[in-house]
Structures are given as C-alpha cells and as structure tokens.
Image: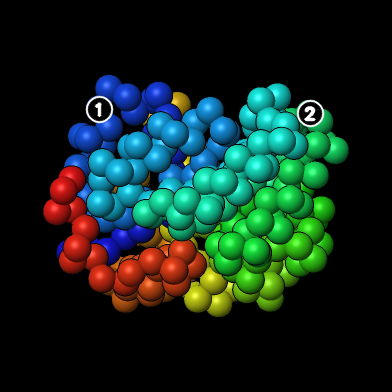
Amino acid sequence: MQKLYDTHCHIDFKAFDDDRAEVIKKAREAGVGRFMVPGVSVEQWPRLQQLANNYSSWRFGLGLHPWFIEQHSQDQLSKLEQALDEKPKHLLAIGEIGLDATCEHSELQRDLFIAQLKLAKEYRLPAIIHHRKTLETTHPLVKQHGPESGVIHAFSGSYEQAMKFVDCGYKLGVGGVITYTRAQKTRQAITEVPLSALVLETDSPDMPTCGYQGQRNEPAKVVQVLDVLAELREMGKESLSDTLWRNSCELFNDSQSASSDHVSD
Ligand SMILES: [Zn+2]
C-alpha cells in the first residue's frame, strides 16, 4: 500500500462536519495515511486539537493565518507560546503563517509572521508558510527569522523562486496547481528542483484538482497530484511516493513507520 502524506489540508473545517470520518476512510483506502492540518486562529485551535486526538493519522500545527487577520492580535502570541509549552501530542509545526497581499492590515500581518517565525525557531518546529503575491517579501523574512526547516505551502512560482527557499532548507508543497497544464512555470519549477525538496498536499477543501473544479477538495485527491508529478518527473509512482513519504516525515520530524497509525481510526 502506498504511503502518502497530505502535508496540508483543513479537514477540521465545517465543510467536513457531515462526513469527516468517511473522508478520512476514503483517503486511507486511496493510500493517504497521514494528514497535517494547520492551525489558523486562536478560536479554531481547541477544536483542531480535539479532532486530532480522535485520529492516530492526524497531525496538526498551530498558527495565526493571515486570512483571519481581523481576529488576530499581538497578545495572542502568548497563547501560542502557552500552547507550545504544553507540547500536545502530534503538534508538529507552527502554521499556517505568512503574508497575503489580498488581505488587509499588512503591518500586523508582518509583525505576527515574524513573531511566529521566531517562535518556530525557538521551539525547533518547522513553519508552514502561506503566501499570496508575497513570495519575494516572504523570503528575506524566512531567511532572517525562520526555523531551519519549513514548507512553502501551495508553491507556485519559478525555478529561481523555488530554489531560494530550497537553499534555506525549506520544502515546497506540491498541490492541485500542477494538475493544470496551463500552470507551466510552476510545473517546470517542480520538475527541476531536487526531489528531496518536495512534499504533496491538497489544501482541502480548497484548490480542487483539474477536472473537479467547483467541488470540495479532499485528501484522497493527493493521488492525482502524485500521478501528475510522476509524469512530470518521469518516475515510477512507487519510488516517488516512497521518497515523498520520507521527505514529509523528515519535514515534520514524524515517525517514518506507518504501522502504528490507523489503529484507533
Ligand atoms: Zn491552508
């Protein structure tokens, strides 16, 4: 059975309230045995943590996402620190954090991003980084303040942009974007960067893959992303998925053995 790791999905969101267990089961049957679910706001963290406790294959991050900037404030950083000090099981990352040019309060976004990068460094956790029209401004901040490892979620950009992050020790999240042939620049970049820099993701319920536009995305679709990546890199799916599994476990300092998973799911 393939060991696939969806390194970025929001299966705690309401979109999955009616059939979450079913979605996870379907993903598992497709070979997707692990999920990283990022934190987005202080209000969401407790529920995320609670859900994570229900599934042995569920990992999570904690962070303040720029999309929810209206709900964030500086004093919430101490709550993040407090949560990190408690070291909950399966908390393996800081994120989702970053800069989004389509959201307001750019100064607060920047302050919170830098502070969270510093916390990730202090607590030796990888950062899950969101970007939107901000790759160029994100890079110097990651380089200056960030932890030694992390992932650029939903990477889309050129080979040169990709390598700047790869050279910092960061991985690139490869998702639905590459299933669209029009995404030429990103497809080319993903084909040329070192394989050790890649991990798979879906960003469920968002970013549907080609052929499923307008529908809710889900972790099982990571298989479609793997298929396209195997084609682009001219690799066998099995050896590709093995390598990507190892890359994902390395990224989150997660156990490479999947044998202990699913027992309680
Ligand atoms: Zn996300």
Left or right of 161, for residue 153:
left
Residue closest to the eye, 190 or 42: 42
**Residue 59 in the image: x percent, y percent?**
38, 52
Q: Position of residue 244 (x, y in %)?
A: 40, 69
In this picture, is 167 found above or below 263?
Answer: below
Q: Secondary structure at mark 1?
A: loop
Taking the image as shown, residue 233 lies to the left or right of residue 98, namely: left
Label 1, on which residue?
19
Between marks 2 and 1, how big is the CA–CA gap?
33 Å
Q: Residue at x 69, y 46 (%)?
A: 98
* Quadrant of the snapshot with the C terminus: top left
Residue 48 found in image quarter:
top left
Left or right of 81, for residue 174: left
Which amino acid type is shown beneath numbered disc 2?
Glu
Crowd class of label 2 (few under 14; some 14 to 19; many from 20; radius 10 Å): some
Residue 104: image tag: 2
Is 178 or 94 nearer to us in this picture? 94
The extreme right residue here reads: 107
* Mark 2 residue element: loop
Residue at horizontal 49 percent and vertical 67 percent from the top? 251
Instruction: Give the label on residue 97, or none.
Output: none
Residue closest to the far left: 263
Q: For the image shown, how many numbered marks are present on the structure?
A: 2
**Residue 171: x %, y % from top left:** 56, 66
Name the residue rendered at 56%, 33% in the picture. 42
Residue 227, percent from left and from top: 35, 59
Three-letter amino acid code at the position of disc 1: Asp
- Taking the image as drawn, is residue 224 in sight? no
Identity of the residue drawn at 41% across and 51% down: 88
Horizontal relation, residue 208 to residue 98: left or right: left
Q: Where, by quadrant of the figure, is residue 148 drawn?
A: bottom right
